[in-house]
Amino acid sequence: MGSMGEGELSEELEFAWGRKSGRGGLNKGCQFYKSFRYDGLEYLLYDCVYLYKDGEPEPYIGKIIKIWEHYDRSRKVKVLWFFRPCEISNYIGDEVKVVENELFLASGNGVGLTNINPLEAIAGKCYVICTSKDRRNIQPSDEEVQMADYIFYRTFDVKQCKIIDEMPEEISNIDITFLLNQMPLQRPGSNIGAFQKPAGNVDALQKPGSIVDSPQKPGGIVDATVVPSDKNLPKENPAVKTDQTCNELDDRPSKKAKLHSSYESKDCIQKVRLISDGNDTKCLELKLDSSYKSKDCIQKLRIKSDGDDTKVLAPTAPYTDDAKVSAPSKKRMPNEKTTMVSDGKLTKESAIWSQHQNHKIDGPELEVTRRPQADKSKWFAEVGSWEDRLRYAHQQGRLVLLQNLDPAYTSAEVEDIVHQGFNESCKAKMIQRTAFSSPHSGQAFVVFNTRQTAEAVVKKLEEGCLLLSNERPLLGKMGTPCFPEKKPKFFGHIVIDKLRSQMPREMKDAISTSHCSQPNTLEYDMALEWCLLRERLDLALKRFYKEQGLQMRKLMGKLKSKKSLRL
Amino acid sequence: MGTSAEAEYAAFEDKVKRTVYIDNLSPQVTESVLQTALNQFGSVKSVQFIPNYLGPSNLAKCALIEMEHAKQVEGVILAATESPFMISGMPRPVRARRAEMEMFDERPAKPGRKIVCSWMKPNDPSFADAMQLKNFAKKSFAEADLLLEKQLQEEEKLAHQQQDTLKTNYKKYEMIDALLADGTARRLARRYNMNVADD
C-alpha cells in the first residue's frame, strides 16, 4: 500500500473520486461513481476487493457493484460477496470437488448476497478470475489463471443454499456480463486501462431505483435491525457503541444471519462447556474475563484518541490495528465465530494461567492424555488447506514451530502435548520427514487461536523447560514457513535451446517422462557427476546427524542419571 | 478399541512397506508424470508430494509413491540405484529409497505409547543440564539448515558447470559441422595433402 495515514481515520489516506455516473437515492441525494482512487490504488466498478473486519482471521472478498457518496458525505460501496469454500462447507456435498483457490459468487436473493459497506473498509484489490465456460464469459488465458489470487466458476445461491453450476442471467439486478471477466482484465495495481472499461451504460442495465428498493437501505440505522446475531460478540459491542469514529461498524448487517442462527446457539453452549470442563480456576478466569474486556475497550478508545498510530490496511497485516480497520458488514461463519468469540477469552486465560502455572504444573509428571473432544469438532473446524492456514496464521503471528519432538509423534499427539503442557487448544501438524531431515528430532507447526497465546507459549518454552518422554526438552519459536515459489528454481536439468528448434515436430511435442540412462552417453557421465555429489552430501549429512545423535544421547543420559540418583 | 487401533497401525505399517520415497525431483514433475514413470515397475496406487514448509525453498521436491506390492518398491529402488533414472529432465537423476513412517502426513499413533511431559523447576539441580540440551538441539537445527543451504549451493554450482561444458561441447560440434558443410575441411585437407574420409 502506498501511503500510510497517520491520524484519526481514513481521511488521511489518499482518496479521490473518479468518473461520475449519475445521481439517485432519496431526493437524488446520492452521487454515483464509476471509479475512485484510494490509498494509491484505482478502484473501478466490478473490481474485486478484500474487506477486513477486525478480529477476523481472513479477509472477505467481494465485487464492488455500486459506488456512491451519500448525502451525508459518507462514501459507500455495495459489495456482492464471494464465499470461500470453507464458509459454505456445510452446503458443499462430499461429491463436489473444490479447487484450492476457488470462490463461489453469491447469487439468488436473500441475506448474504450483497451488503453496503463504508468505502474505507476496502483493504486492497483481489485478483479474481472467472473460469466459467459460459459463452458470455471472456475466457482467461492460462497465465491469467495462474496469476489469479482466486478463481470462480460456480455460484452459491444464498436462498436455496445450493451450489449452482450455471451462471444466471443477472445477480442483484446486475447483468451477468459485468460480473464475469471483462476487457481488459482487472489486475492488482493496474492503473492503466482504468477508464477504458466499457462502463458506459452500466447503470442503465440496473433496474431503476434498485438502490432504494434493495433490502438494505443505505445508511447505518436501517441495517442495525439485522444485527441480532452479533449479540454474542461481547468483545466488540462496547467498542462499537462508544467509539464514534468507528461508527461504520454499525451497519454490520449479518451476512447469512438466518442460515446459521441454529449454529450459533450450539457454539455458545459448546464454548461454555469448554470453559467449564477444566478445574475451578477456570471459573475464576471467566469472571476475570469480563473485567479484562472492559479494560480492553478503554484501551482501544485511548489508542483512538491518541491518534498517532498508522492505519494499516495491507492484507499482510490485518491484525496490527484492529480498532481502526473499518468493519465490512458481513457476518462471520459459524466455525470462525467460535474461534473469534473465544479469542478474547483464551488470551486472558493464558495471561492468568501463566501466573498460576508455576505451582500448578511444576513437579509431577503428567501423562499426556487425549484432550477433551468438545473443542476438537468445532473449535478448529478444518478451514481451507493446511497451506492456506499456515499462511494466515503466520501473517497473524499465531504460528509456532515446535522443535526437538520425538519424530515418531503424530500430529494429534503433538496437539495433546500442547494441551497438557500449556492447557491451550491448537492445530498441529508434524513436518513430514524427508531424506534431509534429522532422524533424532522432529518438528511440528502449531497454529494457535491468537497471537498472544502463541507468544506466551514461545516465551514459556524459552524460559522454562518442558521435558517430554525420554528427557527430551521441547523447543519452540515463532514459525516462519516457507512456501513454494511460483517459479521454483531447480538445478540440474539442462536443455539446449538451439537443439530444440532443430528437433522434428513430433519430438518437440512429445513429453519426456522417464528413462534410465545408458552408459555410453554424455548424459550418463553427467548423471554420474550428480550421483557423486549426492553421495558426498549424503555422507556429510549422515555424519552430522550421527554426531548429533551421539551428543544428544549423552546429554539425555546425563539428565536421566541425575534424576534417578535423586529418586 | 485397542484392537482396532492395532489393526489400523498394522495396516499403516503395511502401507509404508509398499511405498517408495523419491527425491531430487524437478518442480515440474506432477502426480501423473510420477505415475507413468513408476507404472513400469508395477501399478501405482497413490502419489503424494511431501510439502517443504521449512525451506530452503529451492530444495528439490520429494514424493511418496504407494505401489501395489512391497516387491515392486524393491524393483524401483534397484532400477534407480543401478543406473541413473531420470524423470522429466536430464541429466540429474532421481533417488529412490524405502519410505519411512515419519514421512507420512496422516499416520496413526503407535498403540500403547505413553507420552509424559513435565515442567522442570528452575531450581532443579539438573535444570542447567536440560538447558544445555535445549541449546544443543537449537544449534543442531541451525546447523542442519546451514548444511542444506550449502547443499543447494553445490547443486547450483554443478548445474552451471555442466551447462557450460555442454554449451562448449555443442559449440565445438557445431563448428565441425559447419566446416564440413561449407567445404572448408576438404579444402584444408587438399592444402595439407591429407586424406579426409568423406562420410
Image (cartoon, rainbow, N blue to C red):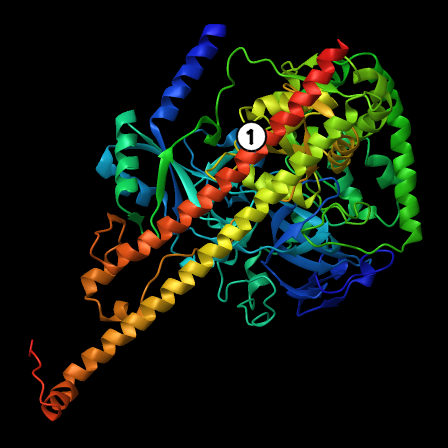
Residue at (69, 49) in percent of width and height: A116
Q: Is residue A347 left or right of residue A129?
A: right
How many numbered discs, if any? 1
Q: Position of residue A384 (x, y in %)?
A: 55, 37
Indicate the secondary structure of the residue bearing disc 1: loop
Can residue A91 be seen by looking at this rendering?
yes
Q: Position of residue B134 (x, y in %)?
A: 70, 32
Question: In the figure, is residue A287 to the left or right of A402?
Answer: right
Name which residue lies at 75% across and 43% down: A54
Q: Nearer the viewer, residue A216 or A491?
A: A491
User: Which quadrant holds the C terminus of chain B?
Assistant: bottom left
Q: Against A511, is A222 above or below?
A: above
In x, y percent, where is residue A403?
A: 63, 33
Looking at the picture, does residue B113 appear above or below residue A505?
above
Q: Is residue A332 visible?
A: no
Chain under numbered label 1: A
Q: Left or right of A306: which side holds A55?
A: left
Task: Give the residue furthest to the bottom.
Answer: B191
Near mark 1 (Cα within 10 A), the count class, few <14, some 14-19 or many ≥20, is some
What residue is at 53 percent from the left and 43 percent from the top?
Answer: A107
Q: Is residue A14 above or below residue A133?
A: below
What residue is shown with label 1?
A440
- The quadrant holding residue A559 is top right
Residue A59 lies in quadrant: top right
Residue A242 lies, with reference to residue A120, above or below; the image says above
Nearer to the camera, A246 or B116: B116
Q: Quadrant of residue A462?
A: top right
Q: Is residue A386 left or right of residue A362?
A: left
Please provide percent x and percent y for residue A202. 56, 63
User: Along the line of sight, which residue is nearer the eye, A247 or A32?
Assistant: A247
Q: Disc 1 marks which amino acid? A: His
